[in-house]
Image: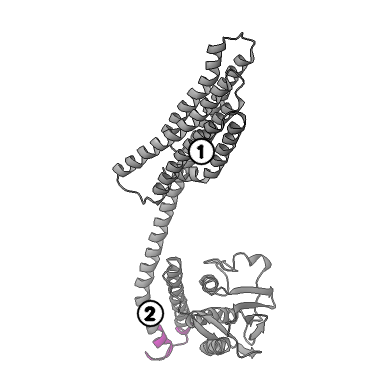
């Protein structure tokens, strides 16, 4: 019902133009008072229809009783509108006398075509309108035949036969458009059903990930703590035979904890539960803290991390803790994919109206065909079972989502075997 009235409202001015045009022709060629009377009758019907349409659009929906009430009012309004148009056409034809009634028949044809194309949402209204227009359509040439009783080769008979063909065309258009509308409506309902199923599946997946991650985190933290104590010698000296196994367990427990943390982050982001606390952020301070936080990991990996600040007064608008997470992801990746003795360089500088942070490593590089999957979840440049560097495949995806929330950009340039440079771009905070 709402589709019907909204469609009618979009064609409001087209109908007014048609009525005004027919009224002007009637006033000029036939009778001014007749034109004014019929035009005002059409305007009254249009005003009632517009008022009722606005009521239906604002109507939030309700009981079946209310729906039936509005449907009855719309039906009465459409009947009044159709009768006013039919009366207009019949009166014009009456003034013309027995003739080829181009103007009144065109008015009826246009109104019937409007109904056929645009009123398919409510089949009962199409039927009512086509009955009114069809009866008027047939009445006008049939009356001439009854009054004049012409020979079959007369133009009046040609007009009558043409009207019958046109009426069939309008009815067929109504049938086709109604069939298409019903088909599209069924497809729309199926799409809504599939969307609801996908949303329920997504919610179930998010709940599953959240529950499993929370349940795994507590025992895994205890396991990691125990392994760290053993690795540090708190439980006694680790024999050379056990040392590789303890180190393997320690590395894999770290990896599992990182995976769980990133899964929880991803689940919160997909559920829209991540709230960012924006404030003014000094980029140089942010980068220094990020490097300090990862310095132990860099020393353990025998990687040197250097910092070059070309402009120390760059201030952006962002969530400090989340931007630390972004820098931690980029720096840990740079260290992870570099060899012992390599250098990771971080450059902070101003580029136009943006603050730029560049993280450059001398690692293995990124293949040219990996750019499309680099920021997708669970993607790995080397996803084989024999890859030398581990990872969850979520770090860069989470980084991209955090930067999107900051309206920031991330790009990279890479040369396989020589290294990669990731560039972050932030809009500078205005003074």
Q: In the picture, residue 121 is in which quadrant?
A: top left
Residue at image location 44% in from the left, 29% down from the top: 127
Q: Where is residue 160 in the image (x, y as percent from the top left)?
A: 57, 18
Residue at image location 39% in from the left, 70% down from the top: 213
Residues under labels 1 and 2: Cα distance?
Answer: 65 Å
Numbered circle sitting on residue 118: 1
Toward the viewer: 369 or 90? 90
Q: In this view, does 431 lie above or below 60?
A: below
Residue at image location 59% in from the left, 65% down from the top: 373
Q: Position of residue 18 (x, y in %)?
A: 57, 37
Magenta part of the chain: 227-244
Q: In the picture, residue 20 is in which quadrant?
A: top right
Toward the viewer: 366 or 149? 149
Magenta: main secondary structure equals: loop
Nearer the observer: mark 1 or 2; the answer is: 1
* Residue 240: in magenta span: yes
Residue at image location 46% in from the left, 26% down from the top: 131
> What residue is shown with label 2?
221
């Amino acid at each position: 019902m709402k589709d019907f009235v909204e469609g009618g409202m979009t064609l409001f001015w087209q109908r007014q133009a048609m009525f005004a045009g027919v009224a002007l022709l009637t006033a000029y060629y036939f009778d001014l008072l007749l034109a004014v009377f019929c035009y005002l009758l059409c305007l009254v019907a249009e005003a009632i229809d517009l008022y009722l349409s606005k009521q239906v659009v604002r109507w939030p929906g309700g009981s079946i009783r209310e729906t039936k009430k509005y449907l009855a009012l719309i039906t009465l309004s459409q009947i009044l509108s159709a009768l006013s148009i039919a009366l207009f056409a019949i009166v014009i034809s009456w003034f013309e006398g027995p003739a080829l009634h181009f103007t009144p028949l065109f008015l009826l044809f246009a109104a019937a075509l409007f109904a056929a194309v645009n009123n398919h949402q409510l089949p009962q209204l199409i039927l009512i309108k086509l009955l009114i227009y069809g009866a008027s359509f047939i009445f006008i040439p049939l009356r001439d035949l009854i009054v004049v009783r012409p020979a079959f080769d007369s133009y009046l008979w040609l007009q009558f036969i043409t009207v019958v063909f046109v009426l069939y065309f309008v009815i067929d258009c109504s049938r086709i458009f109604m069939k298409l509308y019903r088909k599209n409506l069924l497809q729309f309902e199926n799409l809504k059903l599939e969307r609801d199923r996908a949303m329920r599946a997504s919610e179930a997946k998010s709940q599953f990930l959240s529950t499993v991650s929370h349940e795994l985190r507590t025992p895994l933290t205890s396991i990691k703590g125990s392994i760290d104590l053993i690795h540090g010698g708190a439980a006694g000296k680790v024999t050379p035979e056990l040392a590789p196994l303890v180190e393997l367990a320690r590395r894999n427990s770290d990896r599992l904890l990182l995976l769980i943390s990133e899964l929880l982050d991803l689940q919160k982001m997909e559920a829209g539960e991540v709230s960012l606390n924006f404030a003014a952020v000094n980029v140089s301070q942010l980068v220094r803290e990020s490097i300090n936080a990862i310095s132990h990991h860099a020393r353990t990996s025998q990687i040197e991390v250097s910092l070059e600040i070309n402009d120390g007064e760059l201030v952006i608008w962002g969530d400090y803790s989340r931007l630390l997470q972004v820098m931690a992801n980029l720096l840990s990746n740079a260290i992870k994919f570099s060899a012992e003795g390599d250098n990771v360089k971080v450059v902070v500088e101003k580029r136009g109206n943006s603050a730029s942070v560049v993280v450059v490593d001398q690692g293995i590089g990124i293949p040219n065909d990996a750019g499309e999957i680099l920021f997708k979840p669970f993607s790995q440049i080397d996803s084989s079972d024999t890859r030398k560097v581990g990872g969850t495949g979520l770090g860069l995806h989470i980084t991209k989502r955090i930067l999107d929330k900051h309206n920031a950009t991330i790009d990279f340039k890479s040369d396989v075997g020589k290294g990669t440079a990731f560039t972050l771009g932030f809009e500078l905070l205005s003074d």
